[in-house]
Amino acid sequence: MVRSIAAVLLAGIAWLSFGGPAGAADNFDVSKSQAIKMIGETRGSVDQTLELMKNGEVDRALAEAKSGYLIHFEQVEIPLRVADNRLTIECESQFAQIRQLIKDGKPPDEIRSEIIVLRSMLDDAERQLTDAGVGAPAIVAGQSFLILFREGFEVVLLLSVLLGYLEAAKSTRYIKPILVGVGLAGVATVITVVMMPTLFALLPVGREVLEAITALASVVVLFYVSFWLIARLDNKRWMEFVRARLWSAVAIGSTGSLVAVGFTAVYREGFETALFYQSLLSFGDGLGAYILLGVALACVALTGVAYVVFRLGRKIPVRTFMNTAVALVMATSVTFLGNAMHTLQSADVIPYRRTGGPNLPIFLAQATGIWPTVPSLVAQAALSSVYIGGAVWVFVIKPRRTAPKPVRVLTPVSA
């Protein structure tokens, strides 16, 4: 409360010092596109302020903090006040807070924390001035659909194996405990999705760092299941493991064991789903409605797949789906990696090394993970190279090496 009052007072001092609510920028109009460009310039000034503070150049850091506000951000305030006046006031207060901390000779770590907050505010300001467009919502909805549908697709396959095994063994009385376990796994998945942000918030790390760690964990899991051959072998082994667990449970006749089989078979996919959506939501600010749209479409599609498999008893083209999904899964992991690296830079875990481009609109940058910084672009290029190399190995080199060599038939020579 005290800090908020101080921030408002500092903003008032800035208001008086710099010529009123909009300062010198009142003399001309600023379009949204110009304001977005100025936000980029402001970010560069903020980066420079932090770097000067780390180097102990306090006077230069204060001068840079002042110029970053007066020269760049004041022009942003004109259209931003129309879009979100509250956010405008908060940004003014944050700039004033940082200047005051520098004047008071506060430790660089304290100023660094406030600059991290300001970076997040500048992102919010750019979102307010940017239209979502068509591309970013379509990509995010597609990613949301892919995550739930792919994981749900595997659940349908697992259940078809479990129930098919019980029917073939004429042990249909064990179906109910299996379905109870599946239902409990569904409930546990929903609880995991809801509680994961709360549990993560209790960890002693910053929000940005936590988002990056979650995204990197998602990248590892997505990388593991990306290549269609590895995924296929893993699914085969997982299916065999589930069958073995089911056979043991049936042999014992334990209801609890059967419930456990159904639960573990499904919750594995459920936990992965919760992890992926946590990452997607972390980088989906302003696009939450499209994430929900992807969820709804995936639920409809999975209902259709389950009806075809369980009610009509028809086989579905598993291999075709896996081959189609693998490229999309790879692209999603590249997106998560780019966003994770960008977040680590925002949190000052990795220093910013900005480039001249590509400067995508912020919503499209979130949806693709493509940011104009060296660490994020290099990381995405490296992971993409691994995927391309793996695809060449799986589809080109390995088939040629394992293809049977032609047998030369020797014809007898007549005397």
Image: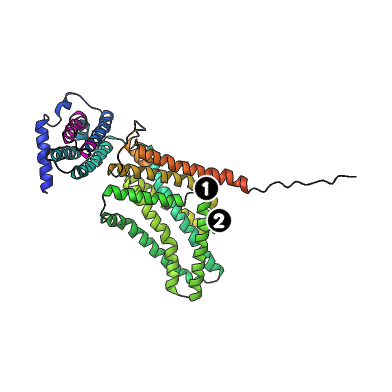
In this picture, residue 193 sits left or right of residue 175? left
Q: Is residue 162 visible?
A: no
How many numbered tags mark residues here? 2
Among the two numbered marks 2 and 1 on one chain, the one whose residue lies closer to the N terminus: 2
Q: Quick one: SS at disc 2?
A: loop
- Tell me the amino acid under the disc marked 1: Asn
Quadrant assignment, res 99: top left
Left or right: where 61 falls relative to 177 = left
* Span colored in magenta: 51-76
Q: Amino acid at mark 2?
A: Lys
Q: Residue extending furthest front?
A: 56
Q: Position of residue 407 (x, y in %)?
A: 73, 47
Q: Which residue occupies the foreground of this view, 261 or 168?
A: 261
Image side of residue 30 versus residue 141, left or right: left
Pick whichever, 153 or 381, lies toward us: 381
Q: Is residue 321 left or right of residue 211?
A: right
**Mark number, residue 323:** 1
Q: Position of residue 159 (x, y in %)?
A: 48, 62
Tag 1 secondary structure: helix
Magenta run includes residue 250: no
In space, the residues marked 2 and 1 are separated at their CA atoms by: 17 Å
Quadrant position of the C terminus in the picture: top right
What residue did someone put label 2 on? 315
